[in-house]
Amino acid sequence: MKKFFTYLLATITGVIVVNIVFTIIFFGILAGVAVMSFKKSGVEIKTGTVLELSLDGTITDRPSGNPLETFDLFSLSRQSPTGLNRLLEKIRAAATDDRISGVYLNFHDVDGGLALVEEIRAALLEFKKSGKFIHAYSSAGYTQTSYYLATVADSLFAGPGTPLLLTGLSATVSYYKEMLQRFGVNPEVVRVGKFKAAVEPFLDNKMSDANREQLSTYLSSRWKNIVKGIASERNIPAERVNQLTDEFRFYTAEELAREGLFDGVIWEDQMLEKLKRAAGSDEKLSLVAFDDYEKAATPNLAKEKIAVIYALGEIGMKQGTFSIGPALATTIREAREDPDVKAIVLRVNSPGGSANTSEIIWREVELAARVKPVIASMGNVAASGGYYIACAADTIIASPTTITGSIGVFGLFFSGQKLIEETIGIHPEVVKTNAHGDFGGSYPLSPLPVASRGLSPYERQVMQAHVNQTYDTFLDRVSQGRDMTTTAVNEIGQGRVWTGEDALAIGLVDMLGGLEQAIALAAGKAGLTEYRVEELPEPPNLWNVLFDDFPVAVKQRVMKSELGELYPFYERQKRLLNARGILARLPFELSL
């Protein structure tokens, strides 16, 4: 008994000590984050200052507002993503700020998607109309996307040995049919639309002609847009840009300069001297980073508001910073009922997901559009369910390279009767009250999403009827919103993906542009000259950050650290395999 109490006391003491240690570490992290968050809060901007855009981190439509999201427990450092909303706002502010003489683009890569890059590029082109300069430089090299962005500059220099690899675009789709057969797993699929290729990799070992057609059209449209932008700003024939790309090799910086892709090859100190002269300064060059310039801004206190409501990520059952749930419908309703909100901009960056949740959100968009202007602004992707929730808006604005459309529906789950019974040797026995009480089967290998049996012929008919009904509803919603017949919508639907530029030609969007254009259009429709932008949904409160978001962020950070470049592939497959119900979702995801 004495030993028992000794062990019990030691265990209790150990638990207390561990909790104290973790509490100290936890609050130490909070303190560190707080210090970094408020670092350099008092920034002085001198006359003749140059605004430096480095764009080192990921660019997102809107930062989460969670200071712990990007906190690295291993290095105790924090890399905050750059919010497109803030970036566009500050570029616009810099154009009229007498203290800012110009912009310095100093980056290697831009991580955020081509449509977001298009918006930044458009904002910088607008900035140039102020008469202020933009100069660009990189000593680390350019990717195709970052170079495309940098070409807006009045001058574009590179360091000695700076690479620029022009390859064009490609998309690779992996097919799993043979692998699944070897494991004894059978995909159970019901779908509508010949282009709804989300499930194709599980049903075949090669790409269908329909999927190849849409991918080829989509990639060609995006590349054409990149080449057009480079050719226009660098005064080089588009044919020559494609020729250099097709002749593929590692060109030296000097060769690229002779082709007109660079204005010269210089060292970084020489570039800084050029900036100093451009700023008209006889003293030390004054550079201000974007983050510091943002902290020096003054708040807008106008009463009347334009609500920018962000719909970012997969559409499912839970609302989060980068996921969409039914709660977004409540946010739209509250904006509709707020008398100070005079217009709504629905910013969509979503590949879709749950058809049911999409319908719930669509209803609130449709109601809001009855009483005040509602403008849909599409980011990198607003496809399938992402298009569903946008189609009731008064006006739809997309980037030329936005992935949109994909009007189609599918259902998918995996049955592994052969794997479970023959390979592993598990034999499920069922007791049920009705004929279809075990619809969908059991999941003896949980958490693997593999059911113990497939669909019966009758159950497949039931599922197909449900999918057809959901698709008909989707067609009807688009038909109402776009003032088209359902027959016309079906002809451009069936799951087919379009770029924003192609979608404009077929009537799925109204104009090309970005978030800034959407806000300006909303203000015009509402008759506003003085207004402030209110961003919704509200950022998570401290409780959610600490106990909901932080554990998820830590898990993602660990997985990213272990998997590296394989992480996006892992994340995509996990989302698709764990999907439940009928989905209105983009048929593929591309990294370009």
Image (cartoon, rainbow, N blue to C red):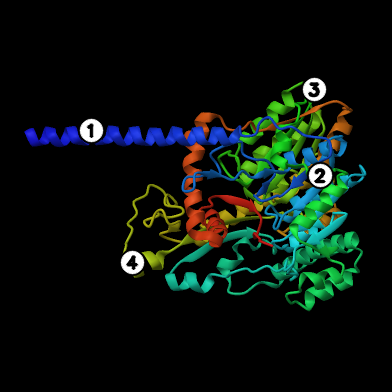
Mark 1 lies on residue: 12
What is the secondary structure assignment of the residue under circle 4? Answer: helix
Are the residues tagged 3 and 1 within 8 Å (C-beta)? Answer: no
Tell me which amino acid carries mark 1.
Ile
Residue drawn at point x = 34 percent, y = 51 percent: 431
Q: Is residue 40 above or below residue 426?
A: above
Cα distance between the residues tagged 3 and 4: 66 Å
Q: Nearer the viewer, mark 3 or mark 2?
A: 3
Along the line of sight, which residue is nearer the eye, 457 or 183? 183
Residue drawn at point x = 45 percent, y = 34 percent: 28
Cα distance between the residues tagged 3 and 2: 26 Å
What is the secondary structure assignment of the residue under circle 1? Answer: helix
Q: Is residue 98 above or below residue 206?
A: above
Tell me which amino acid carries mark 2.
Ile
Mark 2 lies on residue: 396
Cα distance between the residues tagged 4 and 2: 52 Å
Question: Residue 541 occupies which quadrant of the picture?
Answer: top right
Q: Residues within 10 Å of mark 3 (few under 14, many from 20)?
A: few
Mark 4 lies on residue: 424
Q: Nearer the viewer, mark 4 or mark 1?
A: 1
Cα distance between the residues tagged 4 and 1: 42 Å
